[in-house]
Image (cartoon, coloured by chain):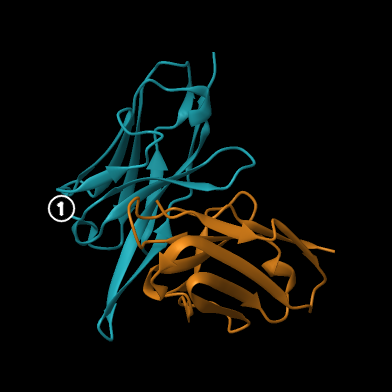
Chain colours: A cyan, B orange
Amino acid sequence: QVQLVESGGGAVQPGRSLRLSCAASGFTFRNYGMHWVRQAPGKGLEWVAIISSDGSSRDHTDTVRGRFTISRDNSRNTLYLQINSLRAEDTAVYYCAREEVQWLAGYYYYALDVWGQGTTVIVSS
Amino acid sequence: EIVLTQSPGTLSLSPGERATLSCRASQSVSSTCLVWYQQQPGQAPRLLIYGASTRATGIPDRFSGSGSGTDFTLTISRLEPEDFAVYYCQQFESSPPGTFGGGTKVEIK
């Protein structure tokens, strides 16, 4: 079945780095744009980053730009999020999600239709 | 950057009642770019509505979405026990593509 499985989270000290992974299965990974979304404890969803299906285009939210880098390896069906210079405010559950784009009646429709279960990052000294 | 403001923050209702959730955008959002999700405690979000009004696969018809421009609404016609959750709207209109509203919690009264 269609599935996304995140890994790589853990407890780390401020200033350190982590690389999160998201393994995709059950669909043609190279055909889809992918996103990272995070959720701090007790807070709402925060969009983090997007990468195009072929990896040629990417964007990050302002609060992480320069520290986080989204990437993908289509030969391994895997999405990544490199997180550097970790801060306490990066503590969150990190979800990867598939972007579904449909062309219907002359318009593009967008949604995140498949989500992983999340991986938890805790930044603490 | 488009900011999405959801209201109310919390909605206290009883099973069987109607829930009306609002999502207001700081700039106009194309209907095709407005999405609603449901999140249960400890779970990943689940796609409910895309294109402002189209139910995703498997979503019961008690869920409906409407609106255009800057004002969008998610309505749950008759609340079932499993509908008590947090609901988020999201826009894909402009960069950054994918910003979320702050969420509305629907709790049991």
Which amino acid type is marked by label 1?
Answer: Asp
Q: Which chain does the numbered disc 1 sit on? A: A
Q: Is residue B22 above or below residue A79?
A: below
Residue at the (38%, 20%) spot, across then down? A85
**Residue A83 visible in rendering:** yes
Q: Is residue B27 above or below residue A107?
A: above
Q: Quadrant of residue A15?
A: top left
**Residue B39 visible in rendering:** no
* Camera-nearest residue between B74 and B7: B7
Question: Where is residue B97 drawn, in percent x and y?
Answer: 35, 55
Question: Where is residue A125 drawn, in percent x and y?
Answer: 54, 13
* Camera-nearest residue between B10 and A26: B10
- Count numbered badges in the picture: 1
Task: State left or right for residue B32 relative to residue A108.
Answer: right
Q: Quadrant of residue B22?
A: bottom right
Task: State left or right for residue B103 relative to residue A36.
Answer: right
Residue at the (71%, 64%) spot, across then down? B84
| 10 Å crowding of disc 1: few (<14), some (14-19), many (20+) | some
Q: What SS does tag 1 mark? A: loop
* Camera-nearest residue between A6 and A106: A106
Question: Where is residue A67 drawn, in percent x and y?
Answer: 33, 27
Q: Is residue A89 above or below residue B20?
A: above
Q: Which residue is mark 1?
A: A54
